[in-house]
Amino acid sequence: MKKREVQASVKDERLVQRRRDQMIKGAVSLFKEKGFHRTTTREIAKAAGFSIGTLYEYIRTKEDVLYLVCDSIYDHVSERLQEDLEHKQGTLESLKHGIANYFRVIDEMQEEILVMYQETKSLNKEALPYVLKKEIEMADMFEKLITLCVENGELNLTEKQIKILSHTIIVEGQMWSFRRWTLQKLFTLEEYIEMQTEYLFSGINGVSQALQKGIITK
């Protein structure tokens, strides 16, 4: 899916990225505290450390900030998973590595992810499909990793099982953010990654054994 273009009057791309990173950080804390609708662009500018005039050199609307948050999450996940797609194709190790990398991105961006899903209801009719499509694209990246393992003989899964597994990985990663109030008291990040990966692979092995024994059919 083509990234939605957020207009900026500044031409220096590195400066635009730096300012938008500041904007995202400031906006996320405000959205979490006050919600999207109650937060003003003036407050976002102040939290980011610059004037309202400067803010409008980098965005046009408040909705643009939510687009930027969404794209930032997707770009970080994509960057991490692309390494596994390119360098360790079709191995269980690459899949495990991809899961671990995804969970670490969730940990690094848990505030952004929490706000993104809390404020989905605030998005307009144009913005909501864009955000939902980005989440599907993240699941698609895992689907590619899993499919490579199937094609390489590392896993025995049907097409639908591949799809449900890819979405399960996405949800289990997000859970580290959504239920952090309890999970992060019980587990370190590395413990959570290890236990969830074991859980996922025990489920995969169970499906494979059931297929072999004829308990379930493709």
Image: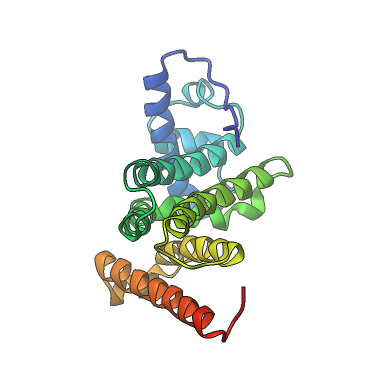
How far from the left and from the top, in percent, is residue 181? 38, 71
Which residue sits at x=35%, y=69%?
Answer: 197
Which quadrant does the C terminus fall into?
bottom right
How far from the left and from the top, in percent, is residue 145? 44, 53
Residue 37 at least partly seen: no
Residue 203, relative to residue 146: is it above or below?
below
How far from the left and from the top, in percent, is residue 203? 44, 77
Number of numbered markers: 0
Would you say 90 lies left or right of 158 here? Answer: left
Residue 92 at least partly seen: yes
How far from the left and from the top, in percent, is residue 19? 40, 27
Quadrant for residue 83, please give it: top left
Kindly give the residue lying farthest to the top in the view shown. 11
Which residue sits at x=51%, y=60%?
Answer: 166
Viewer-proximal residue among 152 and 78: 152
Would you say 84 lies left or right of 156 here? Answer: left
Viewer-proximal residue among 60 and 188: 188
Which quadrant does the N terminus fall into?
top right
Viewer-proximal residue among 114 and 94: 94
Its colouring scheme is: rainbow
Kindly give the residue lying farthest to the right in the view shown. 125
